[in-house]
Each structure stands twice: as C-alpha cells, then as structure tokens.
Image (cartoon, rainbow, N blue to C red):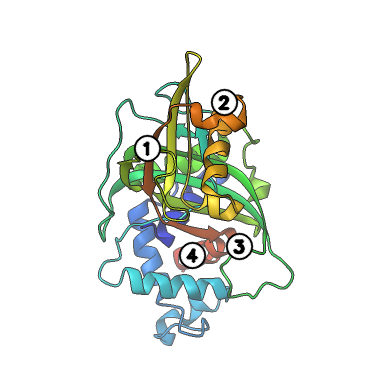
Amino acid sequence: MATVEHCLCCFEALAAYHERRKPMSLSEIEKSWAEYINTIDDDGDEADNKEEAAPVASKTPQIPALRRLAEASASSSSSSSASLSTNSSAGSASSSSNTTLQSGISTPATSVSASPAPAQVHESPLFVTWNVVRRSSDDDDDDDDDEDDDVHLRGCIGTFEAQPLSSGLPSYALTSALQDTRFPPISRAELNPSLQVAVTLLTDFEPAADAMDWELGRHGLRISFVYRGRRYGATYLPDVAPEQGWTKEETVLSLMRKAGWLGDKSRWREVELRVVRYQGKKEKLMYEEYKAWRDWVDGKTAE
C-alpha cells in the first residue's frame, strides 16, 4: 500500500527539477515526515512539545488535510517510519512492444506476478499520476473525496516491472510529469494548490479466465491481443472504471479503444483477449500539503 511519503517524494522530485536543486531522498523524506507529523496535534495547531517545536510549527499552514494525512501516517506506520505504500488516479496505456509506451506503460517481455504488499515495501510495479483538481465550492475542507471535484488528468506513466521505490518513484514522477506525450510538460507555474499527485503500487497479478473475470473497484485490468496481424495492449488502474461510472463491458471496450483497436464495438467479444487482473491501492496528495511540509523543512534548515 502506498503512503504519503511516496507522494511527497514525487512532488519533491518535480519541485527540485524546476528549482534546479538536489531532491531529498525517500529515506530522508520518511524521516522528516515522521518528525513533521509530531508537530501537529489532534487539532492541527501546535506540536506536543511546544518548547522545541513552536518556532517551526508557527510557520506551518494549518491545512485540514494535513491532519488527515498525519493521522493516517501515524496509524499505518507507527511501527516503522520507513514504511512504504501507494494510491493513484486514472491511468491507461497501449503498446506493441516491450518499451515505455505513449500512454505510459513499460511492459516486460514475460507475464508479471506479485505477492500482496507487505507492511514494508522496498520495490514494486508502480504508477505515478498527476491531476489538476478544481475543488467544488461546497467541499468540506476535511473531505478527501474527489467525487464532486473537477479533476483533469495531467499525466500518468508507470511500469509493470518491479522498481526500487527509492529510485523508481522520483524517476516515474518526472517521466509522467514531463514525458507523457498526451500532455505538455508540467511547468513550474503549475506547482500550485490545484496540482495533485497520486501513487499506485501494483500487487496480486493473476491471469483472468476471460474479459469479465474481475471485480469493479477491486481489480486493475491489463489486456493484450492480436488483431489483423497487429499487437495491442493497454491497462486501467483499479479506480478508473468506478471513477468513470463504467460497467465491466464498457471498461473492456474502452480499454481496447485505448489500445488503438478500431473494430466494430458490437463485435469486440470476437477478439481473443489475454487478460491479467491486478490490485493496487493509491495514495494522493495536493501540492499545498507538500508545500506546507517543505516550508517546515526549509524552516528547520534555516535555524
């Protein structure tokens, strides 16, 4: 499962790229985040140790979502500040080879299998998704649900090859932000409160018996097929179909279209599909939440 720290790592990689500085490593971020959440009490006002943390905490914007993130981090990683995990938004890809594709997937030559993510994950197949989120006017500040928000995909690239998270997260954060050919590169000006990053770590790859052998909201789907001598392939992350309100059949057909198939949609079942289902829970983070933590880090450095 993905963590807030994974999302921070992605934002840190993109911000450092635009600011032409060296980014903090994932291990440094994990240690720093553990210290940071200790400066936020249950009400998100001040640190428990006010004498030591008050000068820094006073500089920290009290964003309601930060309290949620702090509580989530405390409950999920209290046994280890190095716990790793993930969460993400929409993602799709298509291909005819074993290279990184236009739609953002690096596909291995052989089928992928993975075990359920343990408490600590050091490497994993992963996707990094960037979104622009316009909050609805009646949103509750503490609500982390994007259902009523205006969400636009800004980039999504990932890989089914297991990656060391320490290097894979920053690498794919930049690749999805700057090299998704469906969109222009994310500029420095776009590092603003509307930018969101989501990380998804993929697990539990298994062959599906057929195109309908999977569950909406639980499984991501990866298909490959040959049609008229041409190879096709594409994937959707587990949350894509529920977010779009698709049925299973609509999801599979959309996935075939995403792969580039232009056949008669009424005859899609005649195409012999190879289907792999997988799981993966995402974590997401808004830029303002990253910036609050980063300002705290800079404040500590300046002391």
Report the Cα–Cα distance between label 2 and label 4: 56 Å
Report the Cα–Cα distance between label 4 and label 3: 36 Å
User: Earlier along the polypeptide chain: callout 3 or callout 1?
Assistant: 3
In front: label 3 or label 2: 2
At x 31%, y 68%, the residue is: 77
At x 65%, y 42%, the residue is: 187
Type of amino acid at the residue the image marks with label 2: Trp
- Which residue is disc 4 drawn over? 302
- Which residue is disc 2 drawn over? 261
Report the Cα–Cα distance between label 3 and label 1: 26 Å
**Does the rendering let one see residue 60?**
no
Helix, strand or loop status at disc 2: loop
In front: label 2 or label 4: 2
In front: label 4 or label 1: 1
- Which residue is disc 1 drawn over? 160
List the single residue furthest toward the right: 137
- Which residue is disc 3 drawn over? 146
User: Earlier along the polypeptide chain: callout 4 or callout 3?
Assistant: 3
Who is closer to the viewer here, 40 or 252? 252
